[in-house]
Image: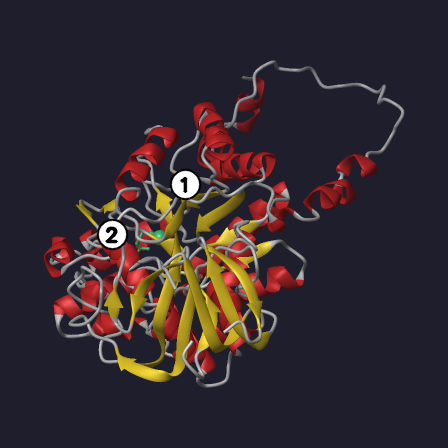
Amino acid sequence: MSQSSILIRGGTVVNEDASSRSDVLIENGLISAVGVDLKAPEGAEIIDGGIDTHTHCQLPFMGTVAVDDFDIGTQAAVAGGTTMLLDFVIPAKGESLVSAYHKWRAWADPKVNCDYSFHVAVTYWNEEVAKEMETLTKEHGVNSFKSFMAYKGVYQLNDGELFNVFQKCKELGALAQVHAENGDAVSEGSAKLLRLGVHGPEGHMLSRPEEVEAEATQRAVMIANRVNTPIYIVHVMSKAAAEVIVQNRREGKRVYGEPIAAGLGTDGSHCFHCNWRHAAAYVMGPPLRPDPTVKEHLMRLLATNDLQCVGTDNCTFNADQKALGKDDFTKIPNGVNGIEDRMAIVWEKGVVPGILTPNEFVRATSSSAAKIFNLYPRKGRIAPGSDADVVVWNGDASRVISAKTHHHAVDFNIFEGMKVHGIAEVTISRGRVVFRDGVLHTMKGSGRYIDRPCFGPPFDGIEARDKDRDERKLKVEREPYTGPVVKDLGVLRVYSQEFLRSVDREAVLLL
Ligand SMILES: NC(=O)NCCC(=O)O
Ligand SMILES: [Zn+2]
């Protein structure tokens, strides 16, 4: 059969809700039939191609540029069974969001080897930004905007700005996302560690413990709930932050949480490694936690659907780039790898020990992302009419992860030496075999940018909740007050407690 027509026979088709022994027929980039005797290698599982919800290919960041570009990043993706990336446009403070979007498209379009789409970060706030958000949703298929609560002085928004961004997201039907870390606490913590003479990578981790992430997570959820708009917390890295999400979901708040491959597969103890380069390789924000039990904890929350999508935050820097921070951990470019190994890490740490079923694996690595970002069932499902992004997955086969053999550009792999089960034997992107038996067959620029319409599933019921909560229902109709009113001084003056203590109170009131 030609590339535009592929029949995968004799496998088990694994969707998020059911598995069945079926063949899969692919024609012209779409799945055209799923059924028996249509005619994968015996015993293989046919899984919908993975969706990585969080990548930063060739991101200009902290004085350098991430080395996995859109070509290498998408090659690594398909080699690991991922067929779609959701990357981020991150405009500089004051830069037009729309221009930044076009700049990122020009970087990505000629290079991508599988489908992709962009979230856009809001790194400052004014009315022009609000208009540009609208343009991005209406003309450029963007339905998610990320705000940073960290990176003080660079990307960090204050609470008032978060209210504005979330309110605009709600109006547009776009999903508000946050990087939840208290940027002021990070900044104070970093300065303290440096003052104490802790300059190495461990200082990064020690300067921003779990409560710094948990507090910001709670604040973001509170603000989103005040606005009554859904909120998506990117890279949930700690038990404390995860607990905030679990509790708020129990209370009915519309909150989604995204652990990443690094947080599920390894931990922050590496930041104490005596080799500086090794330790620096694990520096990312929020940090990987030193507690070795965090990874299993997060995996169990994926099983219960308390956390939803697995991303990677893939943002890779070579040794010489990480060395920008050799004398000061605050200058180490933050970021780790993950795109290629994400699916295998979730299989190894989730399915192999029995924490996740294969169906839950599909939900966590693909279908939930497709639903939350409004791509379903075009992506995230093996069914007639869906895009033919498919992986023939061998859950019994194993490999040892190594920077020597990986498909990334980076010179280090945070999962180095780990034996993982779950191998993508064949990866099909839009009906074309792009990876088979360990060999890439990618075509640079063949991936497409996928528009994502607004008002996806996270918005179901939001309007009804607005009606239910409408405070006007509690407004009290009263007789107007007709008694005396103190003379209006005309000017509202706000004095500090210190000032008030230092002067005669009577005098101040008379001013
Ligand atoms: N996360 C990280 O350490 N690097 C990438 C940029 C970001 O997402 O904050
Ligand atoms: Zn990120």
In terms of secondary structure, where does tag 1 sit?
strand
- Residue furthest right as drawn: 479
Give the colouring mode of the picture. secondary structure
Across and down, in percent, residue 508 comes to: 53, 23
Q: Quadrant of the N terminus?
A: bottom left
- Position of 101 relative to 362 (above/below): above
- The residue at which mark 1 appears reads as 120
**Viewer-closest of 312 and 180:** 312
Nearer to me, 126 or 310: 310
Left/right placement of residue 442 relative to residue 120 reads left
Q: How many other residues sit within 10 Å of disc 1, few (<14), some (14-19) or many (≥20)?
A: many
Q: Secondary structure at mark 2?
A: helix
On the image, the x and y values in percent for residue 66 come to 22, 51
- Horizontal placement of 485 versus 341: left or right? right
The residue under the point 59% across, 48% down is: 230
Q: Amino acid at mark 1?
A: Val
Q: Which quadrant of the view contains residue 119?
A: top left
Quadrant of the image containing the C terminus: top right
Question: Looking at the picture, which amino acid does disc 2 mark?
Answer: Asp
Residue positioned 14% across, 74% down in the render: 274
* Closer to the eye: label 2 or 1: 2
Q: Which residue is mark 2?
A: 71
- Give the distance between the C-alpha atoms of the residues marked 2 and 1, in whole angstroms: 20 Å
Q: Is residue 96 above or below residue 73?
A: above
Which of the 4 image quadrants contains residue 360? Answer: bottom right
